[in-house]
Amino acid sequence: MSGLGGLNKSPNGVVIGMVQLQLPVIETPADIERQTQRICDMVAKARRNMSTMDLVVFPEYALHGLSMDTDDELMCTLDGPEVAAFKQACIDNEIWGCFSIMELNPGKNPFNSGLIIDDTGEIKLYYRKLHPWVPVEPWEPGDLGIPVCDGPNGSTLALIICHDGMFPEMARESAYKGAEIMIRTAGYTAPIRHSWRITNQANAFTNLMATASVCMSGSDGTFDSMGEAMIVGHDGTIIADGSHRPDEIITAEVRPDLVREARVHWAVENNPYQFGHRGYVAVDGGANDCPYTYMHDLAAGTYTLPWEDDIVHTDGSDYGFDPPTRSYDPQPPSTSPVVA
């Protein structure tokens, strides 16, 4: 049920608007300033479009476009004018918003970051993309894990970005932390269309969680982003999906209360619970071991594929980026940025 795209909102519903924003061309700080205003104007459009909307979601690269330019003068900070404008747009229009920025990271590659801001202008969730789309993207791997936050109307939200959604562990971690709605923002182009659809559905069903996903749309003269917003229910059924039309806002109501009901009352296919309680009919409480070799190896820092030595692309040199000269050195939790 989508409540006719959110027009008929139920007492327990969360109405989401997914903006298939026109892909911009960004070359100068002035371009960033103009695009910031355009995004704020679209927040206002979303509010005028549907008075019942709780949350408006913008795609990855909504502010910076797909140039992959890492010039410091084009990068954003949490206390910069772009984020301040997004906060004010949420306040002015009494709506929650999800936004994308490329975040300044002095001395290192920028982060590809996402923000969820509530209707009072407070940053409720701050996420750095864990899995940049290598070898095409130059962004620093995220170091903040996968946070969740309280969302509108009693919901719990998670945010992942684009390529993140191709790793089932990302959605499972979101659900494990309590997310009932997982947002996925992207800049994907048409060759990823089929993978986009099946992963958005699989991420929903295997975690009994609604997913709400959107790409940039239209052409910048080089790239053609595909739009194709999707809102999927916890049973994997598509509730609403979009076309390729730039600036179209795809809307639907999702029901976190039904997610909670399924997670508690489903027996067959209660996947998040059964993952950690294997065979509970045979053994009390189920097996709570970890039979997955790759998990043990990843935790030990020894993750190695059987075909590891044959992998062709292991840096970005074929895509115009210099091979890296430093090892990964994440910030310890005590020095990671804190959102006030």
Image: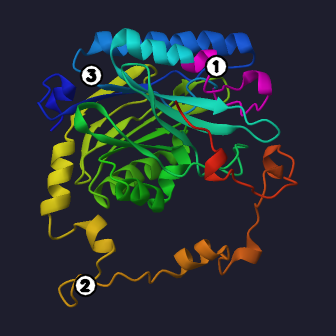
Give the magenta part as a residue range. 65-83
Would you say the magenta stretch is mainly helix, strand or loop?
Answer: loop
Nearest to viewer (mark 1 / mark 3):
1
Find disc 1 in the rendering and name its residue. Answer: 80
Q: Residues within 10 Å of mark 2 (few under 14, many from 20)?
A: some
In terms of sequence position, does the residue under pointer 1 or pointer 2 come before the other?
1
Q: Is residue 15 left or right of residue 183?
A: left
Q: Nearer the viewer, residue 216 or 55?
A: 55
Quadrant (top left/top right/bottom left/bottom right) for the N terminus: top left
* Residue 329 rendering spot, x and y as whole percentages: 75, 55
Disc sitting over residue 53 in the figure: 3
Q: Residue at x 29, y 78 (%)?
A: 277
* Amino acid type indicated by mark 2: Gly
Secondary-structure class at tag 2: loop
Residue at x-position 16% and y-position 27%: 4
CA gap, disc 1 to disc 3? 27 Å
Q: Residue at x 55, y 16 (%)?
A: 84
Where does the image place residue 212, in percent across and percent down from the top left? 35, 40
Callout 1: SS: loop
Q: Nearer the viewer, residue 83 or 186?
A: 83
Q: Is residue 99 above or below residue 276?
A: above
